[in-house]
Amino acid sequence: MLEKSVVSEQDIRTILKEKYGICKIEDITSLKGGSANCYRIQASEGQFLLKEFQSKYSVDDVKTEPKITEFVRTRGIPAANFIRTITGEYVWQFRNRAFHLQEFVEGTIFPQNAAPDWLLWNSAILLGQVHRVLLNFPLMREGFGSEWFGQWDVDESKQRYSILIKAAEQLPRGEKREKILADLHYKIENLSKAACVCIDPDRLTRRNSHGDYHILQLICGVSSVRAIIDFSSACGLPVIFEIIRSYTYADSKCANAQIDVSNLKRYIILYLKNGELNRYDLEMMPYLYYLQRLISERRTCRKKLCPFRYFFRYEVEHLLARCGFRVAELFGDFDKSPLTDDSPEMIFIAEKCENIVDV
């Protein structure tokens, strides 16, 4: 969810002058799309992209991205060029938000499942190149670690889906209700199939990787990729996940949740020009992908399908007071960020009134 920005146009002009020495700004445009507030800056010194990260990210969370991007860019991978501040920093904080600045890359981002053939195949080649280059980068944090494979329980997942089915059955009759019910029953069926497969994470090829590589992260020219963007999710991954995920996001034949086996095979062959896979990777690729989709969709569909009773802030404070409590602290998310109109959560830290001494 896009959060409300903490900067005004005047703030941006002042910050860029003080931190980067960019004085002659001609235009500032807020860019649409994505989960972060981004601004295109047109100045006499050049064109830039200012990114304001969501409140859940600290400077420490995102300070590695410019280093990774610089590492791959200087080794032949098309990527953005980050700009250091006058004091030598890539990432900085303003009003409890992390920011960074990079050169603006002109080009086109194709929609999901709308890649032209040249981009579909170049995407596979580029992913292999990214994995090869990042072999020489220090080991990144782990994604899909061994514990991820052990946290999933089929019976528990079926019970959760059964609860969702009961909730969906309470919806008004109609096409939407039937579609939701059909989707949930389909997921339960797939859970049973997934239960028959045991994936050994230690046998999968793992590499430092982009972490969120797909068509929406590729800025394109007429017939080439000008930049891979957003390395903020970079981590160590089983490479087969990013291969099949990036393929299904790009190929138009996957728009209806189908996989064209011949196209996927060619995608893998092109990846292997620079990357590496073993036989076990190839055998487990579809199972890992569908397992991840089942788990992630199980977590999100509860929010989408179940009716909830929501409370206003002062309602909760009133109810706590009626029960003998008072609010000691109030946050807008589990990262303890302040509560705003755009916060995804309301987190109340309550204390019993009798244990509090007023001073």
Image (tube, grey):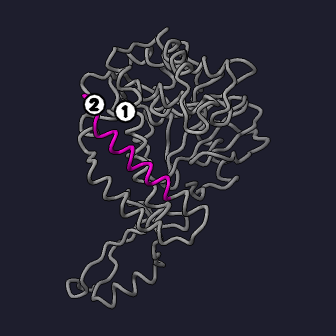
Dot 2: element? loop
Q: Which mark is residue 203?
A: none
For mark 1, does the 10 Å Cα neighbourhood hold few (<14), some (14 to 19), or many (20 or more) residues?
A: many
Tell me which corner region of the image, top left, top right, bottom left or bottom right, holds residue 204. top left
Dot 1: element? helix
Q: Position of residue 328 (x, y in %)?
A: 32, 76
In the shown orientation, is residue 182 left or right of residue 102?
A: left
- Membership of 193 in magenta stretch: yes
Q: Position of residue 191 (x, y in %)?
A: 35, 45
- The answer to which of 284 and 172 lies nearer the viewer is 172
Q: In the image, what residue occupies the spot 59% across and 27% down?
A: 80
The amino acid at mark 2 is: Ile
Indicate whether 321 appears above or below 240.
Answer: below
- Membership of 8 in magenta stretch: no
- The answer to which of 331 and 63 lies nearer the viewer is 331
For mark 2, does the 10 Å Cα neighbourhood hold few (<14), some (14 to 19), or many (20 or more) residues?
A: some
Q: Which mark is residue 288?
A: 1
Q: In the image, what residue occupies the spot 62% across and 41% down?
A: 50
Indicate whether 345 appears above or below 72.
Answer: below
Nearer the N terminus, badge 1 or badge 2?
2
Specify the segment rendered in magenta. Answer: 181-200
The reply to whether the C-beta atoms of the residues labelled 1 and 2 are less than 8 Å apart is: yes
* Residue 319 in view, yes or no: yes
State the residue position of label 2: 199
Q: Position of residue 284 (x, y in %)?
A: 35, 26
